[in-house]
Image (tube, grey):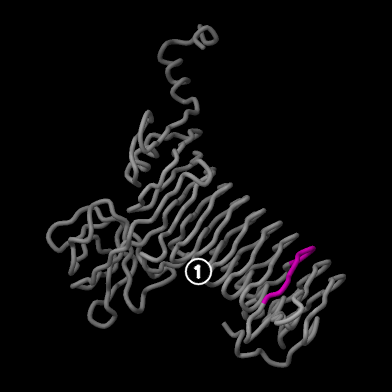
């Protein structure tokens, strides 16, 4: 190396060498840059990274008392099936004084449950979801007071709404970052031992305000919320991942996510929905995924979710509908979405069963060259292949292979059935 750069001064050569991409290793024992078994060890290793570097997390289960925050320009790689980030057991305490907007000190009834460095969420009975919750970190504990950073983002009421703090948080995170890659990591939410936090601020794998991020060959499982959630993003790719066993959604792009790619993933056995397009998911490609056995819908599309393509997916045995277009105003509906060459089979339950359910006012939809069918000889629940509710826009349904529906392959309704107003 030094012969190649013989003409450089020692200081200049040292700068080049220092800037070269390198690997930082974490292990639970043995030789590594950092040895440890929890999020503190992982975060210490992340602190050693510079753009272009790779963090390699060795096999083992790492107990997560807070999020692992990853900066721009790095790769975080585990051993598939063997590197597991496991959410710690949940704790919770009531606040004894209101937690006002901009607070960085909270007075709690049971401070002994918390410690410095722990991730927390502040909620009350009214402000308990979406962007109304505050996710923070305990900076210190002194008597009944938790010092936190960052500050609260809402006013949390003790007397009327039972304000409280709990140690819920997203687990593997990139926030305000770009050009990050996650590979070969399993993230386990320890669902049975933790309270619920939805995908706006939480998730087993959580991306917020990011660009050009890749999640590849990862598994998200058993989170009391959503599996893989990405909000305010551009060019996120989720490739060959599995997301299952969550209380909410398997994969949740939203809040203005442009050009997402979700490919070759398996989203199954989630309590609510396999793939949930939230608000303003646009120009996305969702292909070659298996979306099955989810509680309500395989795919849900709604507010300004436009110009997306769904190709070669298998959408089967989901609780109510394989594909569900949520009701929105004409201006805000999920227009110009295309479904091509998908398998939409055997969806539904005793109350309702549809391959596609299209609520007002989604329109300019193309549904072509798909197989949409109920294949079971007895007890089939997908009773209608494509249902277009009154008030929905134009639907081009062509060259689909349809059959086995006891009610109709294609039907237009006069009113929206109560069972699907959600």
Q: Is residue 328 above or below residue 64?
A: below
What span is colored magenta in the figure?
338-347
Left or right: residue 193 compared with residue 284: left
Farthest residue, direction front: 378
Residue designated by label 1: 248
Farthest residue, direction right: 399
* Residue neighbourhood size for the residue with mark 1, other residues' Cα within 10 Å, grouped as few (<14), some (14–19), many (≥20): many
Q: Give the x, y percent position of residue 281.
A: 61, 63
What residue lies at 46% left-to-right and 57% top-to-bottom?
A: 204
The quarter of the picture where residue 413 lies is bottom right
Farthest residue, direction left: 143
Quadrant of the snapshot with the C terminus: bottom right
What residue lies at 59% left-to-right and 85% top-to-bottom?
A: 421
Q: Is residue 232 above or below residue 100?
A: above
Q: Give the x, y percent position of residue 87.
A: 38, 56
Q: Give the x, y percent position of residue 391.
A: 71, 86
Please indicate, yes or no, whether residue 123 appears anywhere in the rendered image: yes
Left or right: residue 207 compared with residue 322: left
Q: Is residue 226 above or below residue 155?
A: above
Residue 345 part of the magenta segment: yes
What residue lies at 32% left-to-right and 75% top-to-bottom?
A: 124
Closer-to-camera residue (137/56): 56
Main SS class of the magenta portion in the image = strand
At mark 1, the secondary structure is loop
Q: Is residue 232 above or below residue 82?
A: below
Residue 382 part of the magenta segment: no
Please indicate, yes or no, whether residue 178 appears anywhere in the rendered image: no
What residue lies at 79% left-to-right and 63% top-to-bottom?
A: 341
């Amino acid at each position: 190396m030094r012969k190649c750069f013989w003409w450089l001064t020692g200081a200049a050569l040292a700068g080049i060498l220092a800037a070269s991409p390198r690997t930082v290793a974490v292990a639970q024992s043995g030789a590594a840059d950092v040895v440890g078994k929890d999020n503190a060890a992982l975060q210490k290793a992340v602190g050693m990274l510079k753009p272009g570097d790779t963090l390699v997390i060795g096999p083992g289960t790492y107990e997560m008392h807070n999020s692992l925050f990853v900066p721009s320009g790095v790769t975080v790689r585990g051993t598939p099936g063997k590197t597991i980030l496991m959410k710690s057991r949940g704790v919770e305490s009531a606040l004894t004084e209101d937690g006002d907007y901009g607070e960085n000190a909270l007075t709690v009834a049971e401070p002994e449950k918390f410690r410095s460095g722990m991730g927390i969420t502040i909620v009350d009975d009214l402000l308990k979801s979406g962007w109304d919750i505050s996710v923070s970190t305990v900076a210190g504990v002194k008597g009944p007071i938790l010092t936190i950073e960052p500050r609260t983002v809402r006013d949390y009421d003790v007397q009327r709404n039972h304000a409280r703090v709990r140690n819920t948080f997203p687990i593997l995170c990139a926030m305000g970052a770009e050009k990050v890659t996650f590979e070969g990591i399993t993230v386990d939410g320890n669902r049975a031992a933790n309270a619920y936090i939805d995908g706006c601020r939480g998730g087993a794998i959580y991306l917020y305000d990011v660009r050009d991020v890749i999640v590849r060959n990862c598994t998200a499982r058993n989170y009391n919320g959503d599996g893989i959630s990405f909000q305010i993003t551009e060019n996120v790719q989720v490739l060959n991942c599995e997301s299952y066993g969550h209380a909410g959604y398997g994969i949740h792009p939203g809040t203005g996510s442009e050009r997402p790619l979700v490919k070759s993933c398996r989203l199954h056995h989630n309590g609510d929905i396999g793939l949930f397009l939230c608000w303003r998911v646009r120009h996305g490609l969702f292909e070659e995924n298996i979306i099955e056995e989810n509680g309500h819908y395989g795919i849900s599309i709604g507010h300004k979710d436009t110009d997306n393509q769904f190709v070669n997916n298998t959408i089967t045995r989901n609780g109510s509908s394989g594909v569900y277009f949520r009701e929105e105003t004409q201006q805000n509906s999920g227009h110009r979405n295309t479904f091509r060459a998908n398998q939409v089979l055997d969806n539904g339950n005793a109350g309702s069963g549809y391959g596609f359910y299209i609520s007002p006012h989604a329109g300019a939809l193309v549904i072509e060259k798909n197989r949409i069918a109920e294949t079971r000889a007895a007890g089939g629940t997908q009773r209608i292949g494509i249902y277009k509710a009154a008030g929905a826009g134009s639907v081009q349904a062509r060259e689909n292979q349809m059959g086995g529906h006891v009610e109709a392959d294609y039907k237009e309704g006069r009113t929206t059935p109560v069972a699907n107003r959600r």
